[in-house]
Image (spheres, rainbow, N blue to C red):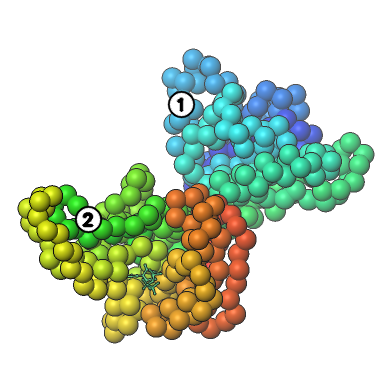
Amino acid sequence: MKNLLNKKILLIICGGISAYKSLEIIRSLKKSNAQVKTILTKSAKKFITPLSVTSLSKEKVYDDIFSVENESEMDHISLSRWADLILVAPITANTISKLSSGASDDLASTVILASDKEIYLAPAMNVRMWEHQSTKENINKLKNYGYKIIGPDIGDMACGEFGKGKMSEPNEILQQIELYFKNKKNNKKFKALVTAGPTREYIDPVRFISNQSSGKQGYEIAKSFRDNGFETTLISGQTNLDPISGLNFIKVETAQEMFDQTIKNLPADVAIFTAAVSDYKVSNYKNKKIKKKENLNLSLEKNIDILNNISKHNSLRPKLTIGFAAETNDIVDNSLRKLEEKNCDWIIANDVSDNSIGFDSDENQISIFYKDKKNENLKKMSKSLVASEIVNRVIKKLN
Ligand code: CTP
């Protein structure tokens, strides 16, 4: 598996009969010349020994969050930063439950909670445990956090029952991990640009016209491009979100500034315009603070339409130009109109009349309108998952 060469994999092994298969995972990773560090949970040590793990990984096994020796050598934060990817195989129903509630009561859960890396989970448990509503809800939560779930498979179980719950075979797990690194490497040749958040149109030095956009969806899309290997630029209006590392992050205020930065950072292979750009700007801007006693007559003029300009630009139009449409009514008609009028390849629409989704919420429900095929309605999910659904479709299209 050539895409695993020199990759740093942190393998976390939880307690379950399939822990013995993790030894095979370590062996294969080492054969592919990956570096492997391992954490064994307390119960994992009842199934396999640290000695067998260390013999295969050629590295020490980490197991105790309160170990003076570990913390001085590589503390739990450094351990999660060291990894290119974290794989938890097998992961038990108990650890799934802990991760879904953000618990951090041992080294494994603390390292995962502190991680900013890709996390893959390979569950293994009895079929009834897997099918239990609580496990289902926990897994859904983890998917929404962006964790990737591999398996489980259907088959005979160690407990004598038959059904879904067997850990996927080591080869299948490794193939999925290799695919992640392969995609990341292939996508390095692509450039992505994302606009996000609201713009501000100043009335005087301290007052402006703006809107409710939180920027969350655009930020998640930019993160997903970055995580998939794209050279990414995020041009953001003023939001309460933290800047994102690992990409070209540009903060702007007005639509004109957003437009100028967009032009400056093109060409790109794909551009997604999620920003809620103010349609109007103030044409009688006062450069001193307006006083109450003055008669205020706001005069507005149409703002520059960034998407419209770029999508009709002779030389700078990205191969894949994607607009957003936040609508309160007539979603289909409005989206199809924008698709055509704004010369887009796709329009991603969401219904902002539903307060549980859209603007400030962490969830979204989108429909994608394509120029060249039938539209798709996606189910309601976290904005992070919506972002990876969109970016996966972009990757398919660009390839
Ligand atoms: N957009 C833009 N510049 C503008 C207005 C909108 O780049 N001045 C982009 C948005 O980022 C989004 C798309 O155009 O990708 C649609 O934005 P939206 O506000 O939904 O549409 P409008 O053009 O404002 O049309 P309408 O007022 O009819 O909804």
| Image x and y of residue 110, in percent | 54, 29
Q: Residues within 10 Å of mark 2 (few under 14, many from 20)?
A: some
43, above or below 328, in the image: above
Disc number at residue 208? 2
In this rendering, the count of numbered labels is 2
Foreground: disc 2 or disc 1: 2
Identify the residue at horizontal 24%, vertical 71% (top origin): 303
Mark 2 residue CB less than 8 A from any atom of ligand 1: no
Instruction: Evaluate whether residue 369 shows in this view.
Output: no
Drawn side of residue 91 relative to residue 165, left or right: left
- Write down the quadrant of residue 199 in the picture: bottom left
Amino acid on which disc 1 is placed: Met
Q: In which quadrant will I find the N terminus?
A: bottom right
Looking at the rendering, the quadrant in which ligand 1 lies is bottom left
Amino acid on which disc 2 is placed: Phe
Closer to the chain start, of discs 2 and 1, is: 1
Query: Toward the viewer: 315 or 32?
Result: 315
- Write down the quadrant of residue 94 in the picture: top right
Drawn side of residue 243 relative to residue 124, left or right: left
| Image x and y of residue 265, in percent | 27, 66
Identify the residue at horizontal 55%, vertical 38% (top origin): 10
Identify the residue at horizontal 49%, vertical 50% (top origin): 361
Q: Which residue is mark 1?
A: 74
Identify the residue at horizontal 22%, vertical 55% (top origin): 208
- Kindly give the residue lying farthest to the left in the view shown: 288
| Image x and y of residue 6, in percent | 49, 47
316, above or below 78, in the image: below
Q: Could you tell me which secondary element the residue under label 1 belongs to?
A: loop
| Image x and y of residue 381, in percent | 58, 54
Query: Toward the viewer: 309 or 7?
Result: 309
Q: Residues within 10 Å of mark 1 (few under 14, many from 20)?
A: few
330, above or below 363, in the image: below
